[in-house]
């Protein structure tokens, strides 16, 4: 893929796409390409509102993501090559907490020129609400149809409040409400209304974003026994504060995030909890931090075991019969296949079981619209990036297309859907898929840095101990203090900046190469051989070479006597 570079002078050039992937790794890896380096720099400058506003340009859920995003950006952070990565997510949380605690009025109602066309969104999770936000900002009349009595989808129904306090959802949601988006709650599309009914009401397009909220079945005897519940039902009961009976000895089957959320919720309701997972701990799909935190809260994890039968007494579950497993050959998903070990059965006493072996989309939403294509995996078929189904005015995205995924991927899908729907309505066709990412190069300066910024250790937020926090649904990870946030932000290497050396003006004094602490600047002859720092001009001139990977944008070389060294910021658009 090529990337078009637009200089301030509006001259277009094309550079190697890999340059961006290799050099601005956090921003590239973020599915919505948040301008992470810039919002971190604004924290160093104490410009928290500006940092927040920049976050909102690409992500309508900064408060939510500051808590529960699995931050794939951090796993790619360049600082992590030599030290621990920058704590990007804790920095985001600091900014959103700061803005919330310093906001006296709710965000203003925006005046946007309204368009005549209406768009229907089915599902009020992150994908649906992102599309609603983008399209409402373009002036479309938006109605969001939601099956449940609350807005938020998985954020509200499945993620426990100790990880995501409800005020965070409300804060982000208020921006969407202020755009005049209409919500129709308790409306089950596919049952109360069909998608064609919606289109017949004059909506120009429909975006299906109902997620993956149906639990996979275990397919073993006794699954219907009283006391065996699927994790979505269980988490909904907990998060909507419904009254229900839970046991004292709870067994959770599965190793993903929903299993961990269920187990940690059950512990907070006073139960003793054991997780049973069929592969080894290394293969557990849940984030390693969540697994560690669950164990700190007293949850036992039994790996390499699988349930084969639920045993009941008086119509209620009293034990799970399991079999030991071992790891076999690698399966089609690249994970070792769990294989039962013959005659290695054992029984776990329990009075409540939560099945959390994975979620799939509930296709009831397309009942009555059976001409919408469905894949063999039970997801709706939609074109990559455009998200158009086989019907031109029906789009689908998020988990109902991709299968169960992470929040920030769903937000990215919401953006794609909004762009395609706008393109469909304004141009009569769905948006053409773009192979280009546009960036511009803007002149900037080296930022002032603390003297010791390259040796600062990663800051850690205060966390309430496991044996104390496992009794409460209150949030247990504290926010960075302002001092911690500024210190952590200093660690960023400013990978979005690029240094250009205007070789024609260079007098070859060699100062830059001498002072560079990372040996990023070399002086080469045109044939690539290193030369001494003295004037040497052949007919093609001298070429200076900079090792961009090594450069940490410290700015020491910027004091060039011939003023040949310029810094530019790469801005994604
Ligand atoms: S050092 Fe800063 S700019 Fe570079 S990848 Fe990490 S967070 Fe992003
Ligand atoms: S900014 Fe610092 S690390 Fe980068 S080339 Fe200049 S002196 Fe070297």
Image (cartoon, helix red, strand yellow):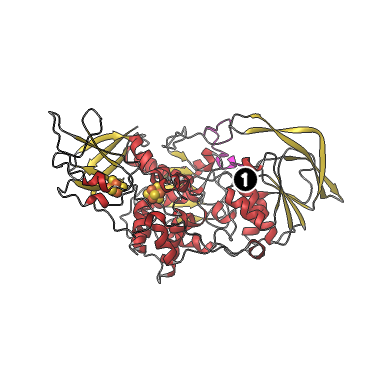
Q: Is residue 200 above or below residue 54?
A: above
> Which quarter of the rendered picture does the C terminus lie within?
top left
The local secondary structure at tag 1 comes to loop
Residue 539 picture quarter: top left
Residue 259 lies, in percent from the top left, at: 65, 48
Which corner quadrant holds the N terminus?
top left
Identify which residue is drawn at 66% across, 58% down: 297
Residue 242 is situated, as x and y percent measured from the top left of the image, at: 67, 60
Query: Which of 428/431 is in front?
Result: 431
Q: Residue at x 25, y 30 (%)?
A: 529
Q: Nearer the viewer, residue 367 or 20?
A: 20
Binning the other alpha carbons within 10 Å of mark 1 as few (below 14), some (14 to 19) or many (20 upward) gives: some
Left/right of residue 410 with respect to residue 313 in the rendered view: left
Left or right: residue 293 versus residue 497 is right
- Residue situated in front as seen by the camera: 499 or 269: 499
The secondary structure that most of the magenta stretch takes on is loop
> Is there any visible trace of residue 58 in the rendered image?
no
* Residue 512 among those drawn in magenta: no
Q: Is mark 1 within 8 Å of ligand 1?
A: no
Report x, y in % for residue 198: 48, 45
Does 449 appear above or below 383?
Answer: below
Q: Which residue is mark 1?
A: 256
Q: Where does the image place residue 84, in percent across and percent down from the top left?
A: 47, 50
Horizontally, residue 564 falls left or right of residue 470, namely left
Q: Residue at x 19, y 49 (%)?
A: 560
Can residue 244 be seen in this snapshot? yes
Image: magenta residue range: 359-379
Query: Would residue 378 be counted in the magenta stretch?
Result: yes
């Amino acid at each position: 893929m090529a990337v078009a570079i637009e200089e301030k002078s509006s001259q277009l050039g094309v550079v190697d796409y890999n340059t961006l992937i290799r050099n601005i790794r956090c921003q590239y890896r973020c599915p919505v390409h948040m301008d992470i380096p810039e919002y971190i720099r604004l924290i160093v400058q104490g410009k928290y509102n500006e940092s927040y506003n920049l976050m909102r340009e690409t992500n309508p859920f900064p408060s939510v993501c500051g808590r529960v995003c699995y931050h794939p950006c951090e796993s790619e952070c360049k600082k992590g090559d030599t030290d621990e990565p920058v704590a990007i997510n804790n920095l985001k949380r600091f900014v959103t907490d700061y803005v919330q605690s310093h906001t006296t009025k709710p965000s203003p109602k925006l005046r946007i020129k309204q368009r005549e066309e209406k768009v229907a969104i089915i599902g009020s999770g992150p994908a649906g609400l992102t599309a609603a936000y983008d399209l409402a900002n373009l002036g479309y009349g938006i109605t969001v149809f939601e099956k449940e009595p609350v807005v938020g989808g998985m954020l509200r129904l499945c993620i426990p409040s100790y990880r995501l306090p409800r005020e965070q959802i409300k804060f982000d949601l208020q921006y969407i409400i202020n755009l005049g988006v209409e919500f129709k709650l308790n409306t089950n599309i596919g049952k109360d209304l069909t998608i064609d009914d919606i289109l017949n009401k004059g909506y120009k397009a429909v975006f299906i974003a109902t997620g993956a909220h149906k639990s996979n079945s275990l397919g073993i005897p006794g699954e219907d026994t009283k006391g065996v519940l699927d994790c979505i039902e269980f988490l909904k009961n907990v998060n909507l504060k419904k009254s229900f009976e839970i046991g004292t000895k709870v067994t959770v089957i599965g190793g993903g995030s929903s299993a961990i959320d269920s187990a940690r919720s059950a512990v907070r309701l006073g139960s003793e909890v054991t997780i049973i997972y069929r592969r080894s701990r290394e293969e557990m799909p849940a984030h390693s931090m969540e697994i560690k935190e669950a164990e700190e809260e007293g949850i036992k994890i039994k790996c390499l075991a699988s349930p084969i039968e639920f045993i009941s007494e008086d119509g209620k579950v009293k034990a799970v019969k399991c079999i030991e497993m071992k790891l076999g050959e690698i399966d089609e998903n690249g994970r070792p296949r769990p294989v039962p070990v013959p005659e290695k059965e054992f029984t776990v006493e329990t009075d409540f079981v939560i099945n959390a072996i994975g979620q799939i989309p509930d296709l009831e939403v397309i009942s009555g619209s059976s001409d919408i294509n469905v894949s063999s995996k039970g997801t709706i078929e939609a074109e990559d990036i455009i998200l158009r189904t086989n019907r031109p005015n029906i789009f689908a995205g998020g988990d109902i297309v991709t299968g169960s995924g992470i929040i920030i991927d769903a937000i990215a899908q919401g953006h794609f859907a909004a762009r395609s729907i706008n393109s469909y309505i304004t141009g009569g066709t769905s948006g053409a898929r773009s192979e280009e990412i546009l960036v511009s190069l803007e002149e900037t300066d080296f930022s002032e840095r603390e003297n010791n910024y390259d040796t600062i250790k990663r800051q850690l937020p205060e966390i309430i101990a496991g044996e104390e926090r496992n009794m409460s649904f209150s949030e247990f990870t504290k926010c960075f203090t302002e001092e911690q946030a500024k210190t952590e932000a200093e660690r960023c290497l400013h990978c979005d900046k690029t240094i250009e050396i205007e070789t024609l003006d260079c007098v070859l004094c060699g100062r830059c190469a001498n002072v560079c602490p990372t040996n990023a600047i070399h002086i080469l002859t045109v044939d690539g051989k290193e030369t001494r720092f003295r004037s040497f001009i052949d007919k093609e001139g001298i070429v200076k070479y900079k090792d961009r990977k090594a450069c940490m944008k410290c700015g020491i070389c910027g004091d060039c006597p011939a003023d040949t060294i310029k810094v530019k910021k790469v801005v994604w658009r």
